[in-house]
Image (tube, rainbow, N blue to C red):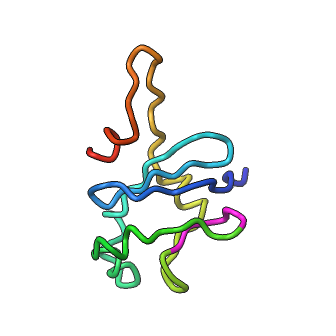
């Protein structure tokens, strides 16, 4: 099965990304796992890391023409964000502070 396309991406603290897929599932991808790879060294710079965008068509995310991640990498290695129960709402602000 092919992974769903990406709807949005939000950079979080501690080099994590909140990725929302078109099927509504959200996953948190920890970029710490790739920072030791030479092609991803620029992600160590906070300003550059925050410049992440969704690629046209939602088939991946990128920071520039050379630094990108596919939807399958994010889907397979991201951790699904737990749904909060209606009685205990967690705001996006709280998620980004973690």
Q: Residue at x 68, y 56 (%)?
A: 5
Q: Position of residue 69 (x, y in %)?
A: 53, 69
Please tell me whether residue 9 is drawn above or below residue 62 in the rendered image: above
> For residue 89, what is the image quadrant?
top left
Q: Is residue 60 one of those drawn in magenta?
A: yes
Q: How many marks?
A: 0
Left/right of residue 23 with respect to residue 53 in the rendered view:
right
Residue ranking furthest to the top: 87
Residue drawn 30% across the image and 75% down it: 36
Residue drawn at the location 37% of the way across and 70% of the way down: 49
Q: Up-down: is 39 above or below 20?
A: below
Above or below, comparing residue 76 to residue 59 in the picture: above
Q: Is residue 89 above or below residue 21?
A: above
Q: Is residue 7 left or right of residue 52?
A: right
Tell me residue 59's x, y (percent).
Answer: 67, 65
User: Residue 57 appears at what percent x and percent y?
Assistant: 72, 65
Confirm whether the magenta stretch covers residue 22. no
Identity of the residue drawn at 51% across and 57% down: 9
The one nearer the camera, 4 or 97, is 97
Q: Quadrant of the C terminus?
A: top left
| Rendered image quadrant of residue 17 | bottom left
Picture coordinates of residue 35, whole percent (x, y): 32, 72
Question: Which range of residues does the magenta coloring cover?
Answer: 57-62
Q: Is 83 situated left or right of 50 in this image?
A: right
Q: Nearer the viewer, residue 39 or 10?
A: 10
Residue 37: quarter of image: bottom left
């Amino acid at each position: 099965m092919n992974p769903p396309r990406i709807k949005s991406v939000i950079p979080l603290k501690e080099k994590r990304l909140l990725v929302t897929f078109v099927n509504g599932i959200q996953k948190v991808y920890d970029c710490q796992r790739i920072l030791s790879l030479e092609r991803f060294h620029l992600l160590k710079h906070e300003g550059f890391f925050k410049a992440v965008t969704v690629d046209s068509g939602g088939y991946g995310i990128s920071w520039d023409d050379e630094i990108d991640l596919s939807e399958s990498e994010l889907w397979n290695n991201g951790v699904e964000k737990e749904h909060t129960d209606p009685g205990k709402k967690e705001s996006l602000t709280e998620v980004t502070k973690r």
